[in-house]
């Protein structure tokens, strides 16, 4: 009986450690992407991306994609996914020579996000298409 309790506690500690690492990884991705948003904000026409921003902001609590705060947002995988979508959309509509370093960092963060295997590729593609449909609908 004592041995089973010891094994159960050990497994519980291991699971908690794993969960902490997961949320730390998400928070790190979100922080890096938030820094990129802040870095490019003054160098783009935000008005041009108002509908993409509005779509993403619907899923961010108490703040905006341009100024992400709070642990809930930073540890949220959906916020990371939406930041990646937002930056992808912006970079698709900016000249290719602009933001080369930022594009590289976003690629690295996309790779780190994909390694976490939170969503299947089809799910990500469908969600991105939903964002594009929202933008198209609101642009008129």
Image: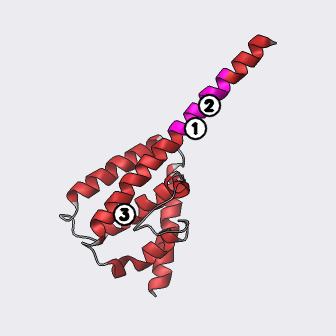
Q: Quadrant of the N terminus?
A: top right
Calculate the distance from the C-alpha at mark 1 to the C-alpha at mark 3.
27 Å
Q: Residues within 10 Å of mark 1 (few under 14, many from 20)?
A: few
For label 2, the residue is 15
Q: Please name the colour scheme applied to the rendered image.
A: secondary structure
Does 23 appear above or below 78?
Answer: above
Image spot of residue 65 (x, y percent): 44, 67
Q: In front here: 132 or 99?
A: 99
The residue positioned 20% from the left and 65% from the top of the image is: 98
**Which region shows up in magenta?**
10-21
- The secondary structure that dominates the magenta segment is helix
The residue positioned 46% from the left and 43% from the top of the image is: 25
Indicate the secondary structure of the residue bearing disc 3: helix
Compared across the picture, whether 89 is left or right of 44 comes to right
Image spot of residue 55 (x, y percent): 50, 72
Residue 87 marker: 3
Observer-side mark, 2 or 3, equals: 2
Disc with the residue nearer the chain's start (1 vs 3): 1
Does 32 appear above or below 68?
Answer: above
Calculate the distance from the C-alpha at mark 1 to the C-alpha at mark 2.
6 Å
Image spot of residue 7 (x, y percent): 70, 17
Residue 19 marker: 1
Q: Residue 18: within the magenta?
A: yes
Q: Residues within 10 Å of mark 3 (few under 14, many from 20)?
A: many
């Amino acid at each position: 009986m004592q041995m089973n309790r010891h094994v159960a506690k050990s497994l519980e500690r291991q699971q908690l450690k794993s969960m902490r690492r997961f949320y730390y990884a998400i928070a790190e991705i979100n922080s890096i992407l938030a820094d990129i948003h802040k870095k490019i904000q003054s160098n783009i026409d935000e008005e041009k991306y108002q509908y993409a921003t509005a779509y993403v902001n619907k899923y961010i609590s108490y703040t905006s994609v341009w100024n992400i705060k709070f642990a809930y947002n930073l540890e949220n995988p959906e916020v990371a996914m939406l930041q990646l979508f937002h930056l992808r959309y912006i970079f698709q509509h900016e000249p290719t020579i602009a933001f080369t370093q930022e594009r590289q960092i976003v690629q690295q963060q996309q790779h780190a996000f994909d390694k976490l295997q939170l969503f299947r590729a089809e799910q990500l593609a469908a969600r991105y298409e939903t964002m594009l449909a929202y933008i198209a609908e609101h642009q008129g």
